[in-house]
Amino acid sequence: MIHSHGRVLLQSDGVLNDQSHLLSRLDTGDDHHIWILYPSERLFDDFLEADEYPPGSEELTETERRDIDYRIHKAFALIDEFSKIWANEIRCVIGTIAVLPTCLGRTQRHFNCRTPYCGVIFVNAFGMNETQIAEAILHESIHQLLWQGWELHPEFQVSAEHADIQSPVTGNVRSVQVMSHAMLIYTATIELLTHTIRTNEYLDYAGELRSRVVALKRGIRVLNAQLSNLINMDAALEILLDNATPERVVQYVYGLQAVK
C-alpha cells in the first residue's frame, strides 16, 4: 500500500489497484491537511497483525464515512480551539489518520507504529464522540512526536533495557520508554478535557470527562513514583507539569537521563 498526494495503491498478486476512494481530506488550516484513510480488505495485512487490523475488513458505507468525517473534523477543531500550539504540532508530525475497521468494536481504540510507519496514527472512530477522538489524536500524536524526536536524537532516548511498568490508568504493561511518554500524554489530556468541560456548559457526557480527569491525575501521581525509581526526571517534571506545550515536550524528552 502506497499513499501520497491523494492516491492509494493496493498491491495484489503483482498488480497495483487504485484505491484512492478510501481517502478523505481533513483541511486543518494554514494550507495544511491530513489524510483520513478508511478501512478496506487487505489494506494493512503485510504490516499489521490480524488482531490490530483484520485482513477481511469491509469498506464503510458512504453514510458511515460522512459520519466519521464529521466527528474527526469536530475532533480536530476541538484540539485547535484548546491549543493552537498542539494543533500546529500535530500538523507537522501527522500526515494520515487511518480509521480502524468497525469490526474491532471498542476492543482497540488507537495506536501508532512508531517510526517504521512515521506520521501515521490508527484511530477507532466506531461509537466514539468527538472528544474521545480528539483525545486519541492528541495521544498518538504525542507518541509520534517523541518517537520521531528520539529517532533524530538517539542519544537522548530513554534506554529500552529498563524494566517494564504497569500503567496506573489502563493496567497495560508497557516499557519505560512508552510510560515516560504517558506522563506528557496524561497532562495534555487533562488540559484538553478540562477545556472541553469548561467551554461546553451543556455537554451531556461532562460527568464522564470529569471522572477521567480524576483518574488521569491519580495516574500521574502513581506513574511519577514508578518512574522516579528508574529515571532522573525531577527537572523535566518541573517543566512538564507546569504546562504541557510542545516546547516543553522537547525539553522533557531531552531532559530525561537514565540513572539505573
Image: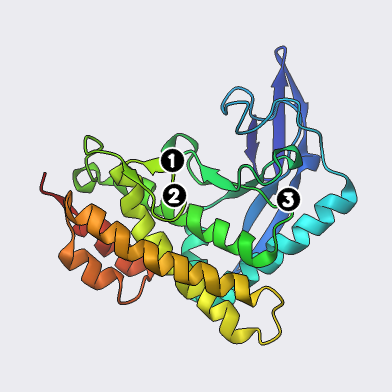
- Residue extending farthest to the top is 13
Between disc 2 and disc 3, the foreground one is 3
Q: Is residue 62 left or right of residue 219?
A: right
Residue at the disc numbered 3: 126
Residue at the disc numbered 2: 144
Residue 130 lies, in percent from the top left, at 68, 65
Residue 61: image quadrant is top right
Helix, strand, or loop for circle 3?
Answer: loop
Q: Residue 193 — which label?
A: none
Compare residues 98 and 153 and report the one nearer the observer.
98
Q: If you read the primary sequence from the N terminus, does the residue marked by circle 1 or circle 3 appear first?
A: 1
What residue appears at the point 53 percent right and 80 percent down from the top-left corner? 195
Residue at the disc numbered 1: 114
Q: Is residue 121 visible?
A: no
Label 2 crowd (10 A; few <14 / some 14-19 / many >=20) = many
Helix, strand, or loop for circle 1?
Answer: loop
Amino acid type at circle 2 is Gln
Label 3 crowd (10 A; few <14 / some 14-19 / many >=20) = some
Label 1 crowd (10 A; few <14 / some 14-19 / many >=20) = some
What residue appears at the point 65 percent right and 83 percent down from the top-left corner? 200
Amino acid type at circle 3 is Phe
Residue 144 lies, in percent from the top left, at 44, 49
Between disc 1 and disc 3, the foreground one is 3
Q: Is residue 206 left or right of residue 187?
A: right
Q: Is residue 179 above or below residue 138?
A: above
Compare residues 18 and 227 and report the one nearer the observer.
227
